[in-house]
Amino acid sequence: MNKFAALLLLLLSGALLAFGEAPKDSCVTCHSALDGKQSEPAKKFDSDIHRQAGLGCADCHGGDRNDDSMNAMSPAKGFRGAPKKTQIPEFCARCHSDIAYMHRYNPKMRADQLSQYLTSVHGKRLKQGDTKVAACVDCHSVHDILAVSDSRAPVYPMNVATTCGHCHSDPAHMKGYNIPTDQVEKYSKSVHAQMIAQGDTSAPTCTTCHGNHGATPPGVASVANVCGTCHVFFAQLFEKSPHQAAFTKMGLPGCVQCHSNHEIVKPSDDWVGTGPNSVCMNCHAAGDKGFAAAQKIAGDIARLKTFLGRAEDTLTTAEHSGMEVSTPKVELASAHEALVKARVIVHSFNPAEVQKLTDQGTEISRKAYQAGVVALEERDVRRKGLGVSLIFIVLAISGLYLKIRQIESRPSS
Amino acid sequence: MAGTERPETNPTRPSRRWINVLLGSGVLASVASFLYPAIRYIIPAQVAESTSRSVVAGKVTELKRNSGKVFKFGSKPALLVHTADGEWKAFSAVCTHLNCTVQYREDHRQIWCACHNGFYDLQGRNVSGPPPRPLDAFEVHIQGDDVIVTRSA
Amino acid sequence: MKAIVRPILNWLDERFGAGSIEEFLRHKTVPLHRHTIWYYFGGMTLFLFIVQVLTGILLLLYYRPTPEDAYESVQYIVTQVRFGWLIRSIHSWSANLMIFTAFVHMFSVFFLKAYRKPRELTWITGMLLLFLAMGFGFSGYLLPWNTLAFFATKVGTEMAGAVPIVGKWMLIFLRGGEEVTGATLTRFFGFHVAVLPGLATTLLAAHLLLVQRLGMSVPPGVEQAIKEGRQEARSMPFFPNFLLRDIIGWYAALGVLGALAAIFPWELGAKADPFVAAPAGIRPEWYFLFMFQTLKLIPAKVLFLEGEFAGILVFSLAAAVWVIVPFLDYRAGFGRVTRFFTGLGIFVLVFMGVMSLLALR
């Protein structure tokens, strides 16, 4: 179907829509009445975003939507039929790569999906005839395509991992490609997956790090950049640290080396140091500089945690027993902050930097702890005041006692 | 006076007068030691109300426009902001990510957490970085020279 | 001293007839025998009640009965108000001491059978006052709005709900709703500072009036001994002898209260959070422990009744029996000691003691 006819049809349906009437679409009408697979597309099409925009089957497949006969599907009317798998990207790109056309619907819409796709592993393999890889409809679905921002869409951030997993987690499907099939499973254990599950769509999912249309796993050298898009401070620190040069030389990816790529879990303090859970020990051994640095860093952080904990406990006890300790509590917040910052500075792998923070935090914790101790002591100082009033009471009681004796020693009352 | 024994005849028995003195002074002193705390109690303290509800965050002249300061609210830090437009805003300064203390950034005109580069806008909404939730907002009232921050009802 | 008091009393007498009161007091005597020591406990309870009223009024100057403010206002009292910690701790300790002396007073009256004719009404008003005192304790306990108080109240009011038919209504009435909320706090505050004091004042006036009218009861054994001439009937004037001894006791109580406040100050605790799980080991104050423990030990079903309901039923019946004991032990009115009631009293005392100790384990 040539562009002119398409345009005409479009304007026609648009005009009809303007009068609040659904444009006549013979494809939908006939195909809805058929059985099984033949009717599926027509039945699904109601929710499709293209339909909402006033487009019909013929806008993609060609043919004549106003023709009720079988002639509607003749090549003379421009009928294209269903594309083969290898033809799908260009099929969609007919409109989606036409900037002027797309901007009629959404001025901000990108029109480079096809060119991106062709750079991706999926795109390259499809060009070579591999029909097992993903093309447009595998991720976006077909005939019931929803907007990315629609939470029911397969490409809505919360659903992306499941969509990718349809192929990438299926060992039978992935046979022969020599890549693992446990990424989704690992990802689902990660903090990022938890954030997504809680509805935070700004959290990373597969496409955030791998790209969507131009999906390619980041190379070893670019991993840190990818993570660093969100984890800015850590990437900056790492880049200035001795690990940057060392990792580059050894061809190791940055962040992933210690934090994993898919199964990124919440790190714990025992990852640093020389203990059994330490990631430092994956490369370093007793006697080398790294070992000493790891030990120092872990020790400083542990010390700060001890002092912080002690101060918190003392202040809480004082508060619960009724003493005024709001000021030391506020000050202790800075010590807690020092701990949080220390855990960030770890990524400089510089013990001196870490120590600067832990020393700060420890000092503040000590002061707060002292304030708590003083408060508890003050509570006890009240006993002195009690002692004074007890003396008076004893005086009064002795006076009373003697008075009674005096009164009762009189022979008659 | 019948029944009064002369102290000289019985040295072990204190005289009537001493007993009265002892009794009188004991009772007076003990009553005073009860009344003193009661009276001091009734007199209002320097800080008229619990500071966990409402607090004087500072003076109007303390902060120029487009600046902020951290102050103590109860036992937690809070942030007072004098915006570039002249509005006064106050929020909890406890970052909703990992509880660091946030601060006002004049260059960004937003609230920033130094720990992980989180940002909040001037409505307290978390707009960038790891913070998962907005900051709790407090009410600000100007009373004379004082900027008074209260917890919202 | 006398030079000041006499003219004032004369002035009052001319306008008020205070003379007859003075006359009466002058002639009031207290019997002297080996059980005289128990006579002090009624006055001690009254004294501690007055301490409660005075410290309570002081606390009222700063306390705020809403969930947002209650804990903070108590915190303010104990940290910012001068001697606030003292007033608050005395109030909390004196509450416990008062209920203790009230129980001692009640049991001593029971075992010495002072409830017998003509003092039945004194006993009844006294029992009602004891229930009121426990109501004071229960309602006051919630007011600081800390975790312990919140959950203890939840558990306590839950038991009210176990009564069939009226139980649900009772629970809603007590809680001001289905759950323990700010409505409960407001309501308990109203009970604690208005309703209960009003009722207590009325009952106390009746109780004291009756005691003055009827004088002090002498235990049947002593009465008998006097009648048979084995013992002399001795007494001491109430004013000033007994009163001076009373005052020594009250001073000692004040000393104890001050010591408790300074050495074992009453905790502030953590602010109540209705949405967290109850911490382990929640239990009511000691004077409710025996009931609490009994209910825990009762099996889920007793015959055809729900276990909890059966327990509450038994306690209610026991309380009712206890209140009407002067009428049940009518023989005591003739000076006869019915061993059964002494045994019953010992059983109840031991039961309460054992149950309370078990609950503390």
Image (cartoon, rainbow, N blue to C red):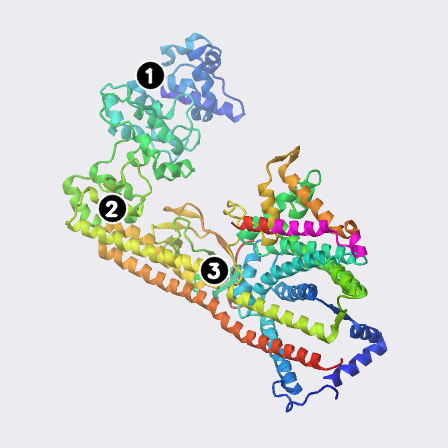
Residue B10 position (above or below residue A294): below
Coordinates of residue A134 in the picture (x, y in percent) = 30, 24
| Residue A169 forms part of the magenta stretch | no
Q: Nearer the viewer, mark 1 or mark 3?
A: 3
Q: Which comes before the other along the chain, label 1 or label 3?
A: 1
Residue A319: mark: 3
Q: Which comes before the other along the chain, label 3 or label 2?
A: 2
Residue A83: mark: 1
Outermost bottom residue: B8
What is the secondary structure assignment of the residue under circle 3?
Answer: helix
Residue A130: mark: none
Question: In the image shown, does A86 or C171 lie closer to the viewer?
Answer: C171
Coordinates of residue C171 in the picture (x, y in percent) = 66, 44
The residues bearing labels 3 and 2 have C-alpha atoms spaced at a distance of 36 Å
Residue C40 position (above or below residue C19): above
In the image, what residue type sits under mark 1?
Answer: Pro
Question: In the image shown, does C204 or C57 lie closer to the viewer?
Answer: C204
Q: Is residue B76 visible?
A: no
In the image, what residue type sits under mark 3?
Answer: Glu
Residues behind callouts 1 and 3 on a single chain: yes
Coordinates of residue B138 in the picture (x, y in percent) = 50, 55
Which residue shows up at 44% across the image and 15% down it? Answer: A40
Residues behind callouts 1 and 2 on a single chain: yes
> Circle 2 is placed at which residue position?
A275
Is residue A135 toward the left or the right of residue C226 in the image? left
Question: In the image shown, does A7 or A57 lie closer to the viewer?
Answer: A57
| Span shown in magenta | C331-352
